[in-house]
Image (cartoon, helix red, strand yellow):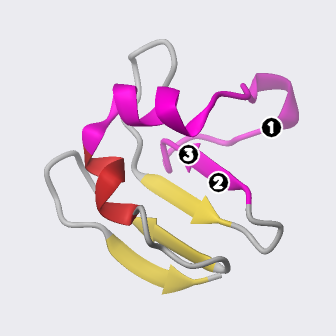
Amino acid sequence: MLDNKSPILYVEHDSDGDWQFLCGQNEHTEENAKIISLKQAVEIDKTLNELYEMPVGIGAERNEIGEKWKPFKL
């Protein structure tokens, strides 16, 4: 995602209140994780603003950029 090769397709607002922004397609490990601010994530993908009020314990996903976010319970 941060290398502009993969779009953000999967978002979690986990039980600790942290946000995770993932491509939803590749295996994710701690070794390839990056810590960024919410502001940086929104600069990468402005549609994340649609999830602003997403409660803790909820995730959202989509198959491609431009699709509507589909929320789900974690």
- Asked if the stretch drawn in magenta spans residue 21, the answer is yes
Amino acid under label 3? Phe
| Location of residue 59 with respect to 5 vertically, above or below | below
**Is 69 on the left or on the right of 35, as rendered?**
left
Q: Position of residue 1 (x, y in %)?
A: 48, 26
Name the residue: 52% across, 57% down. 11
The nearer-to-camera label among 1 and 2 is 2
- Pointers 3 and 2 in contact (C-beta within 8 Å): yes
> On the image, numbered disc 2 is attached to which residue?
19
> On the image, numbered disc 1 is attached to which residue?
29
**N-term mark: 3 or 1:** 3
Q: Position of residue 40 (x, y in %)?
A: 50, 26
The nearer-to-camera label among 3 and 2 is 2
**Residue stretch in magenta:** 18-46
> On the image, numbered disc 3 is attached to which residue?
21
**Is 44 on the left or on the right of 39, as rendered?**
left
What's the distance in space between the residues labelled 3 and 1, CA to CA?
13 Å
